[in-house]
Amino acid sequence: MTKDSVLLITGADGFVGQHIINHLQNIQYTNVHGTAFRPESASRLAKTLGNNNVHTLDLTNQPAVTNLLATLQPRGIIHLAARASVNESYQQAEAVLNTNTKLQLVMLEAIKEAAKQARLISLGSAQAYGVLPAKYQAQPINEEAPFYPSNPYAVSKATQELLSRAYQLSYQLDIIHVRPFNQIGPGQSTDFALPSFADQIVKIEKGQQDKLLVGNLEAVRDFTDVRDAAKAYEVLLRQGVSGEVYNLGSGAGVTMKEVVQKMVALAKVKIEIETDPSRLRPVDVPHFVADISKLNQLGWQPETSLEQTLGDILESARQANQ
């Protein structure tokens, strides 16, 4: 993998994709391409990548994806495109399962048919670990832990990984399997917890809302700044071992209560917190922390403090609500 290699990022207009593109360009990658589903997203993406490197298409369309790979002949693919909300998956389970499975299957078929030289960074999710048996609880989770997914999104991501493994074994494809834990940072949708908290705090600061509404604050989570995660994906493109699975996280656990307290401390006004029953999930994993020793061995370490990330998320929310 060289810095003039053709790299393709699917779902490049999304939260993680934009940060990966920024990192790749900052370290002088010169041939980065991205896909977008909607023309308006493609137009925004073109401002960063240029018109010739943005491809507007439906990634569930097999002929279109195969044709794109045949034309580009990418050396690396970071396959981010997915429906990524746990909460959405409870409301639209069939759509999330069908879409994420189809997105993975189409990409694998396209690589098999048109770009067998490509290294695929296949995005699973730590959500697939789910509610693990007692012997795995309250300790960092390594890549040998089994899957006990507890929501439809987690099932869809486990399915994506299993499909990738099947195609890798059957057709000798070059695939790196990644299981990201919670990735956070500026620009993330308010469909996710921390951006939602930030958005609410800004509204409280502006007198538009009375209380900060939260869900379960007892859960322990592992948060990685998305800008650190972007660096990890580039490291995996170059140095990851084909066929291996890598957890991507910070390796540190923090309760949601601590996170909320840190965010409230950054507010410009006093904040009152209230539990909102509608924000509680049917099942919530109590302890979710990554063992990242495999990724550490490739030379990657998280660099950004949680406090810095939370401050950036809150400032991003203030700018969005101006």
Image (cartoon, rainbow, N blue to C red):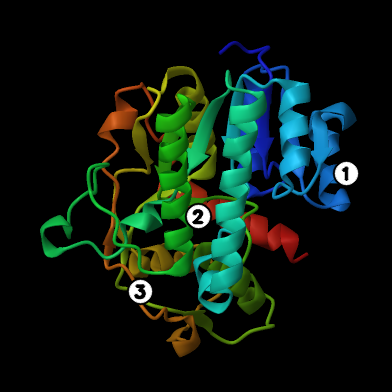
Front residue of 44 and 120: 120
Res. 47 image quadrant: top right
The image shows residue 181 at horizontal and vertical percentages of 40, 50
Q: Is residue 2 visible?
A: yes
Residue ID for mark 2: 310
| Residue type marked 2 | Leu
The image shows residue 84 at horizontal and vertical percentages of 56, 58
**Badge number at residue 43:** 1
The image shows residue 222 at horizontal and vertical percentages of 35, 53
Query: Of discs 2 and 3, which sits in the foreground?
Result: 3
- SS for dot 2: helix
| Residue type marked 3 | Leu
**Left or right, 221 with reference to 105:** left
**Disc 1 crowd, CA 10 A, few/some/many (<14, 14-19, 20+):** some
Q: Earlier in the sequence, mark 2 or mark 1?
A: 1
Q: Indicate whether 98 appears above or below 93.
A: above
Q: Earlier in the sequence, mark 2 or mark 3?
A: 3
**Left or right, 214 with reference to 210:** left
Q: For the point 58% across and 18% down, which residue is it?
A: 117
Q: For the point 63% across and 84% down, which residue is it?
A: 209
Q: For the point 45% across and 26% down, which residue is it?
A: 236
Query: Of discs 2 and 1, which sits in the foreground?
Result: 1
CA–CA distance in space, label 2 to label 3: 16 Å
- SS for dot 1: helix
Q: Earlier in the sequence, mark 3 or mark 1?
A: 1
Residue ID for mark 3: 217
